[in-house]
Image: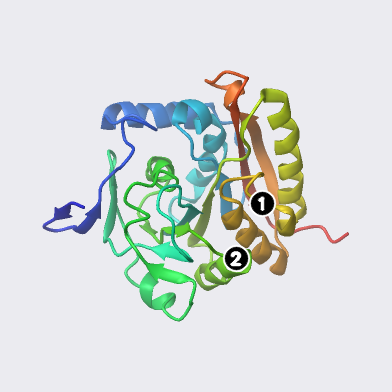
């Protein structure tokens, strides 16, 4: 882990040049092009978005449909809670790093200094850097956030072996007001053929849109714990979600014999009682 004289302890970019361009100019251009292609309509400042985390050539267009909606709220959103699955390092609970900043080719983003204190009494939360150091799930969202927001701080969380209710308790503690945005990072189905993936992802989308967190599992989404935890809190607060996009790698840059699914959602003001 690198260290900067004025920055504190730095979590350097781990997947620049692989999941997204490593050149600052090329990365900025790529993100701006993806955001520019997103069709957007005015929305109130969202509490949360759900976005994929594959390489930009595969899932960038889907992710951009959610991130583009944040631009009008660039001055409102000052704290972002990105949460997603740990793919490389197993652990119990939710991992909050000890680093001071996260770095991408577009610059550094500070971590919220009060996060550890705010979460100190929640048993599922552990202070751990090892899961974060190689992880792509949160990193790939940062260049989008750096492109659509102005000044913001992070509370980055990775889920390990945890229960959805534990995730919900952490999100409840961090919920805040309009200044706080929760970014759930998750892909959907993995390595089915194109038509099978479309069917499974449609079922998953229905679970998400109905708030049916208990039906979600690892076959639906790699980040199902983060999605389920968010849905628990949204149900409790009377919120719903709006689908922005649903696709898979066979629609973008991949073959159709073995695909990964992607979806993007944004919070609605209220869920209809029915």
Q: Is residue 46 visible to us here?
A: no
Q: Residue furthest top?
A: 255
Can you give x and y, in whole percent of width and height, for residue 34 in the image?
48, 29
Provide the secondary structure element on which disc 2 rests.
loop
Comparing 40 with 54, the one in front is 54
User: Which corner quadrant of the image does residue 231 belong to?
Assistant: bottom right
In this view, 220 is above or below 131: above
User: Which corner quadrant of the image does residue 166 belong to?
Assistant: bottom right
- Scheme of colours in the image: rainbow
Q: Which mark is residue 102?
A: none
Provide the secondary structure element on which disc 1 rests.
loop
Q: Which mark is residue 163?
A: 2
Q: Report how far apart the C-alphas of labels 2 and 1 lie in the structure.
A: 11 Å
In this view, 217 is above or below 22: below
**Residue at figure coordinates x 31%, y 42% from the top left:** 14
In this view, 178 is above or below 37: below
In this view, 161 is above or below 43: below
According to the picture, the residue beneath numbered tag 1 turns out to be 217
Comparing 56 with 45, the one in front is 56
**Residue at figure coordinates x 41%, y 48% from the top left:** 88
Can you give x and y, in whole percent of width and height, for residue 25 in the image?
28, 28
Count neighbours of disc 2 (C-alpha within 10 A) and say few if under 14, some if 14 to 19, many if 20 or more: some
Mark 2 and mark 1 residues within 8 Å of each other at the beta carbon: no
């Amino acid at each position: 882990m690198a260290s900067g004289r004025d920055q504190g302890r730095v979590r350097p970019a781990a997947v620049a040049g692989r999941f997204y361009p490593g050149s600052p100019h090329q990365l900025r251009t790529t993100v701006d092009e993806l955001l520019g292609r997103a069709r957007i309509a005015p929305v109130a400042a969202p509490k949360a978005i759900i976005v994929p985390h594959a390489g930009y050539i595969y899932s960038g267009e889907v992710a951009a449909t959610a991130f583009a909606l944040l631009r009008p709220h660039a001055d409102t959103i000052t704290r972002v809670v990105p949460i997603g699955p740990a793919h490389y390092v197993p652990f119990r609970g939710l991992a909050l790093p000890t680093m001071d900043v996260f770095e991408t080719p577009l610059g550094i983003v500070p971590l919220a200094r009060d996060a550890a204190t705010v979460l100190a009494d929640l048993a599922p939360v552990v202070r751990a850097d090892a899961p974060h150091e190689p992880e792509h799930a949160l990193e790939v969202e940062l260049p989008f956030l750096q492109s659509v927001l102005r000044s913001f701080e992070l509370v980055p969380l990775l889920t390990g072996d945890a229960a959805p209710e534990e995730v919900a308790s952490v999100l409840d503690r961090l919920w805040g007001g309009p200044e706080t945005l929760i970014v759930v990072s998750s892909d959907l189905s993995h390595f089915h053929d194109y038509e099978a993936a479309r069917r499974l992802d449609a079922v998953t989308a229905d679970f998400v849109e109905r708030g049916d967190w208990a039906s979600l599992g690892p076959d639906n989404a790699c980040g199902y714990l983060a999605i389920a935890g968010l849905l628990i809190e949204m149900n409790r607060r009377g919120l719903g979600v709006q689908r922005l996009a649903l696709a898979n790698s066979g629609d973008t840059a991949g073959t159709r014999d073995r695909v990964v699914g992607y979806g993007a959602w944004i919070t609605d003001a209220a869920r209809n009682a029915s």
